[in-house]
Image (cartoon, rainbow, N blue to C red):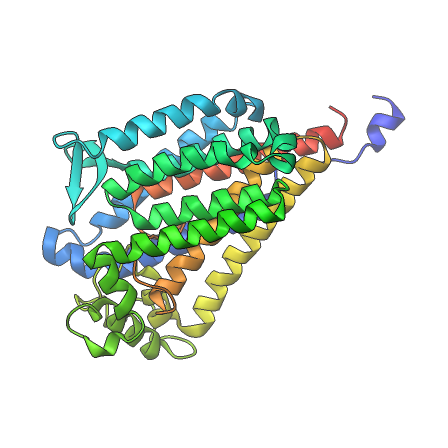
Amino acid sequence: MSPRQMAAPVVAPYDYLLILNVLALLLLGLLMVTSASINVSDQELHQPFYYFFRQIVYLGAGCFLGFLIIQFEIATWERLSWFLLIMALVALTLVVIPGIGRSVNGSMRWIGFGALGFQVSEFAKLAIIVYMAGYLWRHHHEIKTQLSGFIKPMVILTVVSLLLLREPDFGALVVITVTTLGLMFLAGMRLREFVILLGGAMVSLSVLAISAPYRLARMTSFLNPWAHPFDSGYQLTQSLIAFGRGGWFGVGLGKSIQKLFYLPEAHTDFLFAVIAEELGLVGTLFVIALFAALVLRIFSIGRRAQELGQHFAGFLAYGFAIWIATQFIVSIGVNSGILPTKGLTLPFMSYGGSSLLIHCLMIALVLRIDYENRLLELGM
């Protein structure tokens, strides 16, 4: 070994702080899902740790798939972007067909057999981001100079939106729309077109929000849930009671009262309310800090990728960061009564196999981007 080689600095292959950040969210999520669901699963299924064990299985499957995916170069995903988009459109079409899609709480969002089910909209989020990252890189000049640059992806977004509304899954539609708009803004779309697009998206989402009676009830009840505390405002009032009981340091792990059949979906959509009750303001601020650090780190990885000339990887990382930020902001906003009630899980933490699987794959792709950045920095 030459003296030059001996003097070469040792560079870690991956961002271990990012990995520790994600592990903290996953482990805290497992702990809180167990706490929030133990009474419900014991009463309904006579298995106190039913949801915990299922979450462990999905987490193991997500880690295994992530280990496989991280072996492939990011360029592979650019080549597969069209294929993934077609798969997502086919899956979103199949899920609304009676006999193929599975209805849960009045929504046709799952495809599966027996006890196994997969929420198609989670895969659609991933597929749309991969496709958009490739499109924005291939057509970056057209996006900055021509009107057609943003019309083409809007056609695809419209098709996806119509399919999601057939389920219906308004929450997934919001996440995909915000992520797509955010990516196009970062790609350098002309301000005039972006303002028109943003205004059109806001008007469309507003019309959709008030077009269905149940969505209109959610839109109006969150403004004053105490007006109908046992009807349309029930879920939110129970969530706010959980926040109020939590105080500064919470009532203690496992001691939540609201999870005892008062707060519906306590281990899924309203997990953050249980965190607020059991861990208090300090606990909620810690969770928010973990998400903020994760989003900022992914943005940093994306920016570094673009500085190294890996524009597809950069847009892909940006898309994942916007996705996580949007979903955790909406989830926290819904739980605290700042936003209308809609079904969105807390990323990495809430119970949900489909969401956990896809988020594990997302982090694997981010780690691969970071790995390739480090190789390029070393001149390899």
Q: Nearer the viewer, residue 281 or 131?
A: 131
Q: Is residue 377 above or below residue 318?
A: above
Q: Is residue 255 above or below residue 141?
A: below
Residue 372 appears left or right of 209: right
Say which quadrant the C terminus sits in. top right
Q: Nearer the viewer, residue 162 or 66?
A: 162
Residue 265 appears left or right of 365: left
Residue at 34% across, 65% down: 335
Say which quadrant the N terminus sits in. top right
Residue at 33% across, 53% down: 344
Q: Position of residue 190 (x, y in %)?
A: 63, 44
Q: Is residue 270 visible?
A: yes
Residue at 28% across, 54% down: 268
Quadrant in the picture for residue 367: top right
Q: How many marks?
A: 0
Q: Position of residue 192 (x, y in %)?
A: 59, 48
Q: Is residue 19 visible?
A: no
Residue 182 appears left or right of 223: right
Quadrant in the picture for residue 207: bottom left
Q: Position of residue 307 (x, y in %)?
A: 72, 37
Residue 184 appears left or right of 119: right
Q: Nearer the viewer, residue 82 or 154?
A: 154
Q: Nearer the viewer, residue 40 or 170?
A: 170
Residue at 20% across, 70% down: 234
Quadrant in the picture for residue 166: top left
Q: Position of residue 24 (x, y in %)?
A: 47, 53
